Amino acid sequence: MKIISPTTNDVATALQAISAEVAGAVHSVNPEAVTHAAELILAAPRVYFEGAGRSGIALKMNAMRFMHLGLHAFVIGETTAPGVGENDVVILASGSGNTASVVSVAQKVKAAGAKILLLTAGSGGELSNLADVTVNIAAAGKQSVDRSSSAQYAGSLFEQAVVLVLDAVFHAIWVANNIPAETLWVRHANWE
């Protein structure tokens, strides 16, 4: 197979298509569910993030941002993450709501007394049964081959929306608490 370089017009068209899809996915989210998500996060002693593949990478971006707020934020599976306990919140992302590794983690943290916040494109799934709060995102999951739900490959739209929805939660908490940007800035990495 020969790979052909796109034209400037191809890239411009792709940017327009992707930005329109992302806007649609973000606007599909129920603001009340996101408000419940923020309340759950703020009530937690610690906040954990877990997802597989690109969904997990999207959550890592948000874990960093919530740490900047001053929350005790951890990524499950990282060597410095402490065990999950009673009333901690575990934020999960799974387009299907059935990702086996994420379901396994959810079952364990639920047994430990944690609350679960789920971001999903699925309408059900095992994770929905375990979640305390579910934020549904109208986006194609990675196994959807129906290009009518998204022109993008695999779960790209879902992963992009996960970043933006949790960024909106961060932003709303930051603004509501009137935290000076300088307070957040001192929590940024200073070895770069």
Image: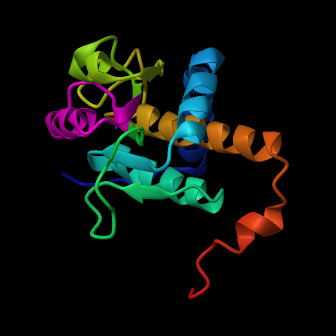
Q: Quadrant of residue 31?
A: top right
Q: Is residue 66 visible?
A: yes
Q: Name the residue: 41% across, 42% down.
A: 88
* Above or below, comparing residue 185 to residue 151 in the picture: below
Q: Nearer the viewer, residue 53 or 134?
A: 134
Q: Nearer the viewer, residue 143 or 178?
A: 178
- Which residue, as the protein is rendered here, is positioned at the far bottom? 191
**Residue 32, magenta (yes or no):** no
* Above or below, comparing residue 46 to residue 40 in the picture: below
Q: Nearer the viewer, residue 137 or 5?
A: 137
Q: For the image shown, how many numbered marks are present on the structure?
A: 0
Q: Name the residue: 77% across, 66% down.
A: 183
Could you tell me residue 109's position as x and y percent? 26, 39
Q: Quadrant of residue 107?
A: top left
Which residues, given as a range, are shown in magenta? 92-117
* Above or below, comparing residue 100 to residue 139 in the picture: below
Q: Name the residue: 28% across, 55% down.
A: 83
On screen, residue 33 versus residue 178, left or right, reads left
Could you tell me residue 48's position as x and y percent? 40, 49
Specify the quadrant that holds the C terminus.
Answer: bottom right
Q: Quadrant of residue 80?
A: bottom left
Q: Nearer the viewer, residue 3 or 92?
A: 92
Could you tell me residue 133's position as x and y percent? 45, 22
Q: Name the residue: 58% across, 53% down.
A: 66
On screen, residue 164 versus residue 82, left or right, reads right
Could you tell me residue 9's position as x and y percent? 60, 43
